[in-house]
């Protein structure tokens, strides 16, 4: 990372910090929830409850995102709000570590997820503060890439604790300790960002900041409607990122429902992280040569294949294949979406625009699990929900094709 500036390195390092929690969301946290919930309810009901819990968490933040983003655009507010929600997320995770009841576990997860997701609004918008437009694809891609690898370190330590169970630890106690390790990792690697990243694009402070921030939300919506590139992209993003987030957050729950063992799922998803590392960097380099939107569209087509393959999945080796292919597409589609949007928007209103970017992402993250939840609770199986995700990827691809040619890069 010697070719990056200190603010760029510090910004990238936070991707390593928070990716450890992302890893828990897609592996240990839902598996542990299922082990608690299935003492009282069936496997399919547990899947449905978890999907509903995920939806509630993201829906709450989706409602708050535009206002939080607008408020953070004022001078000096971005890092203050980031720090506030960092504390909420980390304390929530620490409390989650001590929960042994599935209902309290569910409530604490919602709080933790809100803190984590709110941090990402401010963190994503900091991309415009740490680098120039022509470096955004590369910086964003390295963030995701190193996040994939870095997140494996606390995760592997946690898995070893769970498997070995030293000092006579129970499986539950070892799992809870792994949550504490992740919380410490999250805090420790955030320190460079707090020290070295500063808000360089902002609106001047004013007496009526709260009311002014609220009024700006409507003005920004009008600006988005009048800008075809931003409008088509953000709606397309809502569709395709819905599928991406749902596959991440529901992978272990879905795999458990169709009979894949916890060990196979965790190891396969760990492989996903290692595959995603070089593929995210490759996607960033490829975007500089052929265009960012073209690489995003290729990733969407890969996800269409993932949905079709996942619909018939019922064997462990198929889950492994799926994990590899997801790793190939996941890093590129997430990192390039972030950097492309960062180039489209006004820099001094980046938080507000990323608030809307996040609200579309969060409503997507709400809608996808709701599809899975409906299929699990009403139709008795989550597999039908996979076909619903396929439709969303197709719609996202079509909308990206509508973006004017002069915005292709």
Image (spheres, rainbow, N blue to C red):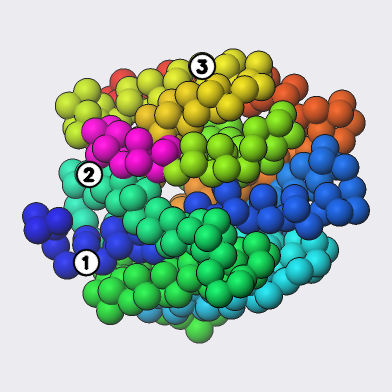
Most common SS among magenta residues? helix
Point out the image quarter for the N terminus: bottom left
Q: Residues within 10 Å of mark 2 (few under 14, many from 20)?
A: many
**Residue appearing at x 80%, y 61% in the figure:** 102
* Range covered by the magenta-colored residues: 271-284
Q: Secondary structure at mark 1?
A: helix
Q: Secondary structure at mark 3?
A: helix
Using the image as rendered, state which of residue 205 and residue 171 is in the foreground. Answer: 171
Which callout, 1 or 3, points at the residue further toward the start of the chain? Answer: 1
**Residue appearing at x 41%, y 38% in the figure:** 271
The answer to whether one can see residue 396 in this image is no
The reply to whether discs 1 and 2 touch (Cβ–Cβ < 8 Å) is no
Horizontal placement of 340 versus 302: left or right? left
Which callout, 1 or 2, points at the residue further toward the start of the chain? Answer: 1
The reply to whether discs 2 and 3 touch (Cβ–Cβ < 8 Å) is no
Q: Which mark is residue 138?
A: 2
Q: Secondary structure at mark 2?
A: helix
Q: Is-magenta flag for residue 138?
A: no
Q: How many marks?
A: 3
Residue 366: which quarter of the image?
Answer: top right
Residue at which label 3 appears: 305
Does 372 appear above or below 189? above
Residue at which label 1 appears: 7
Residue 93: which quarter of the image?
Answer: bottom right
Marks 2 and 3 sit apart, C-alpha to C-alpha, by 26 Å
Q: Which mark is residue 23?
A: none
């Amino acid at each position: 990372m010697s070719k990056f500036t200190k603010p760029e390195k510090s910004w990238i390092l936070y991707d390593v910090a928070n990716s450890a929690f992302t890893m828990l969301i897609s592996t240990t946290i839902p598996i542990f929830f299922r082990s608690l919930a299935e003492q009282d309810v069936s496997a399919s009901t547990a899947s449905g409850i978890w999907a509903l819990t995920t939806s509630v968490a993201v829906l709450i933040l989706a409602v708050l995102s535009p206002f939080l983003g607008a408020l953070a655009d004022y001078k000096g507010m971005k890092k203050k709000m980031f720090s506030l929600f960092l504390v909420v997320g980390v304390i929530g995770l620490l409390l989650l570590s001590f929960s042994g009841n599935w209902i309290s576990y569910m409530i604490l997860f919602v709080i933790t997820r809100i803190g984590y997701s709110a941090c990402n609004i401010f963190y994503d918008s900091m991309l415009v503060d740490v680098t120039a437009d022509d470096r955004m694809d590369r910086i964003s891609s390295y963030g995701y890439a190193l996040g994939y690898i870095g997140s494996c370190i606390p995760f592997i330590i946690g898995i070893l604790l769970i498997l070995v169970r030293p000092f006579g630890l129970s499986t539950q106690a070892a799992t809870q300790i792994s949550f504490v390790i992740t919380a410490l990792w999250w805090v420790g690697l955030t320190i460079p960002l707090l020290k070295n990243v500063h808000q360089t694009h902002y609106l001047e402070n004013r007496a009526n900041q709260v009311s002014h921030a609220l009024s700006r939300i409507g003005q920004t919506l009008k600006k988005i409607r009048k800008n075809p590139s931003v409008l088509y992209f953000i709606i397309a993003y809502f569709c395709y990122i819905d599928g991406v987030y749902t596959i991440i957050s529901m992978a272990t729950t879905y795999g458990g429902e169709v009979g894949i063992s916890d060990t196979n799922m965790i190891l396969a998803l760990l492989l996903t992280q290692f595959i995603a590392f070089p593929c995210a960097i490759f996607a960033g380099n490829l975007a500089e040569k052929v265009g960012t939107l073209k690489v995003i569209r290729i990733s969407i087509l890969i996800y269409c294949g993932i949905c079709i393959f996942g619909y018939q999945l019922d064997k462990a080796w198929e889950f492994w294949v799926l994990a590899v292919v997801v790793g190939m597409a996941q890093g590129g589609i997430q990192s390039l979406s972030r950097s492309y949007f960062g180039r489209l928007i006004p820099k001094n209103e980046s938080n507000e625009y990323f608030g809307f970017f996040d609200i579309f992402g969060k409503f997507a993250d709400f809608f996808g699990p709701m599809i899975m939840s409906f299929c699990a609770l009403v139709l008795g199986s989550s597999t039908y929900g996979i076909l619903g995700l396929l439709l969303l990827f197709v719609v996202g691809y079509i909308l990206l094709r509508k973006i004017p040619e002069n915005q292709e890069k």
